[in-house]
Image: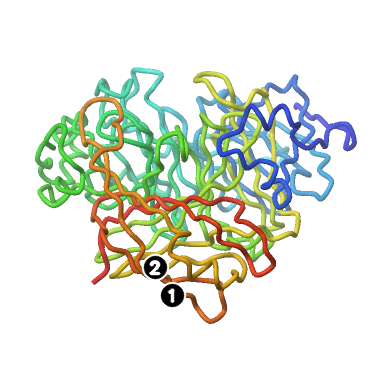
Amino acid sequence: MLRIRGAILCGLIATSAASQELGNAWGTANAESKHYRIVELPIPRALALECGSFVALPEGKLAIGTRRGEILIVDGAFEPLPNPSIKTFAAGLDEVLGLGYRDGAFYATQQTEVTRISDRDGDGRADRFENLSDVWGFEHYHEFAWGSPVQPDGSVYVVLGLSSSYHYKADYRGFAFQITPDGQSVPIATGIRSAGGVAPNEHGVMFYVESQGPWNGSCSLKHLKKGGFMGHPICFPGYDLPLGQQLGSKPQEPENRSRLHAESQRIEELVPYAVVFPYRRMGQSITAFRPDRTGGRFGPFQDQLFVGDYSLSIVMRATTEEIDGVWQGACYPFREGLGNGILAIEFSDRGYLITGGTNRGWPVRGNKSYVLERLEWTGVTPFDVLEITAAKDGFNVSFTAPCDPETLQDVTNYAMRSFTHHFQKFYGSPEVDETTPVVRRAVAADDGCSVHLVVDGLVEGHVHDFTFGAIRSADGDALVHNTAHYTLNRIPK
């Protein structure tokens, strides 16, 4: 049994200035560090840790599913001064990119199956491996399988990547399944290209993240709607298979170089992106996401989504809302400068956000290998955009602290643009169909914490970029981040 313990003082180190520079995405690392520090946990390099998934366990422990096929149990990761010890619970698995825990058993999503893993004799090592589902095929390393945490009904949701972005080489690639506790595999949706994570959003509705590529102009959060088509038609042969037939007839083929908004009105099953992350400005390969349920221990963003990104080594925020039966919402910068490519994040109820991943594979900004890090709120609330929601004549914007009334009501402090992408079979898309909405009025709330913006030129189906100018807090502070991005699928009636 592997058991490793690191020294507190030599292992507990904040991310260096050099590492932050390499991880610089928005140029805000110094301002962010006053509110959220990055702490590297003391994990010996010999462990060669490559995190693929996390789950918080009872008694303050953390379980890690690794790319190398292990389940590791970490004791002490959530202590104020972390001095973690690590034990190997299971090994010999295959890229554990989803991990859940229920009733004493782990639910591991591997590339080829969902496995329930338990320790029957109580010696701290797995000795029972139950295959709950392996209905999908596997023929290519790019056919990643991502699994959700265990849901209240005991189910795990799995999203299956295609073969090298463009190809369908094995059964049910590009499908999503609900795997029930008794091993039933229920098809949920199709059209997935290359996911990076699957979990409930802040409202408890199942979402997944999609990477830029064919039929995806940029990275996005998508609603995993029952019977939904997520946009990539190369998976259509799966509709002819027994489980695919449960979804009914295949959707119409999307028109190449069209627009997703128009196609979603023509193709009933097609699900619009709920939140688009403008490429490179807000992520380049987004991955795991979790809602903050820490009760304020992580700062002012309770119940919002926190989203990792592999390529840029950053964590972002997102909020979603449902308008006329369609999900939409906004994304916001949060924290840059992490040590490697983020594949997994997890909250502790003590108020820490654990992050981990790898820099092996695709290029990443974080230059550290085999690191486990956590974000800690310093107790100093950042002056930042809290949330943007849609209104029939514009948007409502709230802030984390009261604003100076004069700057809050000055319409020159709000610059906007809107755009969309080609909906096409080619890889990614430039930002197209750009417009310039104009803020005509800014009506501040009495408490100074929010403002209603009356906007001319709203465009359904477009991402609406916000750049906030010289807005100041009541204490004279500038915003930590002065940009945000709202995906407006429906203008509220």
Q: How much space separates mark 1 and mark 2, taking CA atoms? A: 6 Å
Q: How far from the left and from the top, in percent, is residue 274?
A: 34, 51
Q: Which mark is residue 453?
A: 2
Q: Is residue 35 above or below residue 82?
A: below
Q: How far from the left and from the top, in percent, is residue 363?
A: 52, 20
Residue 433 is left or right of residue 365, and the answer is: left
Q: How far from the left and from the top, in percent, is residue 415?
A: 41, 54
Residue 198 found in image quarter: top left
Labels 1 and 2 touching (C-beta < 8 A): yes
Mark 2 is on which residue type? Leu
Q: How far from the left and from the top, in percent, is residue 388?
A: 44, 62
Residue closest to the eye, 370 or 441: 441
Q: Is residue 237 above or below residue 489?
A: above
Q: Which mark is residue 78?
A: none
The quadrant of the image that shows the C terminus is bottom left
Residue behind mark 1: 443
Upstream in sequence: badge 1 or badge 2? 1
In the displayed orientation, state which residue is furthest to the bottom.
Answer: 446
- Residue in view at x 31 percent, y 49 percent: 418
The quadrant of the image that shows the N terminus is top right
Residue 380 found in image quarter: bottom right
